[in-house]
Image (cartoon, helix red, strand yellow):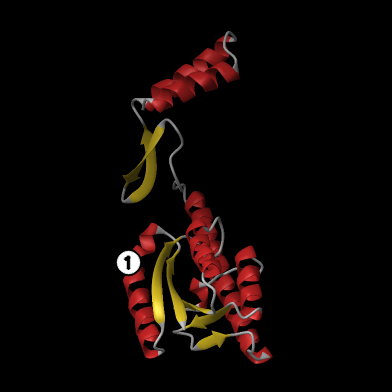
Amino acid sequence: MKAFLVARVSTDDQADALPAQVYRLKDYALKMHYDYEIFEVKESAYKGERLEFNKVISRIFAIDETIALVFDKVDRYSRDSSSDEVRLLNSLTESGKIELHFSSDHLIITKDSSAGQRLMLTMNTAFSQYYSNAISDNVKRRNEQMRRDGLWTGRAPFGYVNTVKDSKKWIKVDPFRSLAVKEAFSSYASGNTSLREIKIRHYSRRQYD
């Protein structure tokens, strides 16, 4: 059987995890005696556009045989059971065009899979989605506490730069961009310049920053 091995991370910061996924996927393919192609994808399996993974889908349609689509774990497949991607892959599985393999989860879904096996996939996807949502909740709570403590969270606004003060994240005035901010406020306060004119002037300057 032809197999597409998909090693997937959500961000460039997680790229170090790809080699371990690739190793496990190749080991699985060799044990199953598959003729395989490997795809390394760096994009979210939970939200946003999936341009790189769409290339894998295009390759599936280009081959006139059943494809084993292999992921290391269910959370590398998707963390959103309602996504268009999941609906498409489920449809391809039900038609027999693909089989879904999750090597580390020891789970295979085919057109002949039982209700129990499909339930395992649904549950694992739901748990993956819960894990992502829980991380997001933790980040929000941490940022709320930082703001209560008088600390800065996130990227500095235009006219400031991120820095560290007393070993904690803070911002300080950018000596150059702050001049543009002062000029914008002064121009608008004069009553002789519209917000549109200030925006155009500001945009033109940023292009040459």
Residue shown at 56%/10% (left/top)?
190
Q: Is residue 166 left or right of residue 113?
A: left
In terms of depth relative to the viewer, which is nearer, 162 or 70? 70
Which residue has dot 1 on it?
16
Q: Is residue 206 above or below residue 147?
A: above
Q: Is residue 71 above or below residue 13?
A: below
Residue 10 placement: quadrant: bottom left
In terms of depth relative to the viewer, which is nearer, 39 or 195? 39
Q: Which image quadrant: the C terminus?
A: top left
Which element type, helix, strand or loop, lies under badge 1? helix
Would you call the spot at circle 1 few (<14 residues within 10 Å), some (14-19), or many (20 or more)?
A: few
Residue 179 placement: quadrant: top left
Residue 149 screen position, x and y as percent: 47, 51
Q: Amino acid at mark 1?
A: Asp
Residue shown at 51%/71% (left/top)?
63
Residue 39 placement: quadrant: bottom left
Residue shown at 50%/15% (left/top)?
186
Residue 23 screen position, x and y as percent: 33, 78
Q: Is residue 207 left or right of residue 110?
A: left
Q: Is residue 208 left or right of residue 202?
A: left
